[in-house]
Image: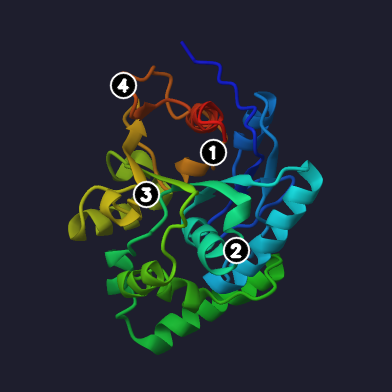
Amino acid sequence: MKKICDCSTKYPILMVHGMGFRDRKFLCYWGRIPKILRQRGASVFFGNQDANASIEFNGAVLKNSLKKCLAESGADKVNIIAHSKGGAESRFLASSLGMSRHIASITTISTPHNGSSTMDKIMKLPTPIMKAGSLIFDVFMAISGDSKPDTYRCLEQLTTSFMSGFNRKNPDVEGIYYQSFAFAMKNPFSDILMAVPFIAVKLMDGRSDGFLTAEEVSWGNFRGIYTGTGRRGISHLDEVDMRRMRLSRKEPRNKNEISDITQFYAEIVSELKGMGL
């Protein structure tokens, strides 16, 4: 039976998206998740950063979003929940932009804290080809609303070498609770949109959500690998409810199985409330 979670945290929730999409009112990056959290008592705000801008540029945007969140909510801190590259931007916000005193917790969902070894291999492709492809994405992202798209730089910032340096420059801040989660697809058919990258990552690095392995996303209090109750597992897109529907009708058999991603987020926020955050 689904547990009804109390999500009325002391501090508001600031949701920070990853690459490729923007926060939109009628096509939300996070699917049904914000609505469910609000129904259960949470105060939810969004990062509103660019889809394909650098960590540094998006960090500055997040700083403004955080200030706006504090002004509108009257709170002095926020709980950040970030997906993918948004987690690195959130850590940059805390460690390098002087906003740590306003952050109670940072929860990251499949963030490449340790870089992606698959991206290391992709970035070895001829630079002119990579930059030409990135420029095409930049044009599309500019039309979509990005103010400073830089897809090539984004890809560079997903490599293991970049994140190694990033981690040295952006250590965890005392007083902020950091936790991370990993996810896994069960087979290439779990998510047809992630089938090709899933196969590539599996051949090179092993079990993943179609993009990142558990070793690559582990940071702070690592909570383990989560997957679905059915045959699909959970892909990098499923993690943010891209399909706006349950993953499976089967009920979870253990704490690391999920049938509906909205319930997973509700339980995370309920835990933060239980911690006094």
Crowd class of label 2 (few under 14; some 14 to 19; many from 20; radius 10 Å): many
Of badges 4 and 1, the one in the foreground is 4
Q: Secondary structure at mark 2?
A: loop
CA gap, disc 2 to disc 3? 25 Å
Screen quadrant of the C terminus: top right
Q: CA distance from mark 3 to mark 1?
A: 29 Å
Q: Residue at 65% of width from left, 46% of height from top? A: 77
Q: Give the mark nearer the N terminus: 3 vs 1.
A: 3
Q: Disc 1 marks which residue? A: 243
Quarter holding residue 140: bottom right
Residue 214: x and y in percent read 29, 49
Kindly report the distance in space between the C-alpha atoms of the residues bearing marks 4 and 1: 24 Å
Callout 4 environment at 10 Å: few (<14), some (14 to 19), or many (20+)?
A: few
Q: Secondary structure at mark 1?
A: loop
SS label for mark 4: loop
Helix or strand or loop: what does disc 3 sit on? Answer: loop
From mark 4 to mark 3, how far is it between C-alphas?
A: 23 Å
Q: Residue flagged by tag 3: what amino acid is it?
A: Gly
Q: Nearer the viewer, mark 2 or mark 4?
A: 4
Instruction: Determine if residue 232 is in view.
Output: no
Pointer 3: what residue?
A: 220
The residue indicated by pointer 4 is 254
Q: Earlier in the sequence, mark 2 or mark 3?
A: 2
Q: Which residue is mark 2?
A: 51
In-front residue for pair 30/78: 78
Residue type at mark 4 is Asn
Marks 3, 1: nearer the viewer: 3
Give the residue type that dot 2 points to. Ala
The mark nearer the N terminus, 4 or 1, is 1
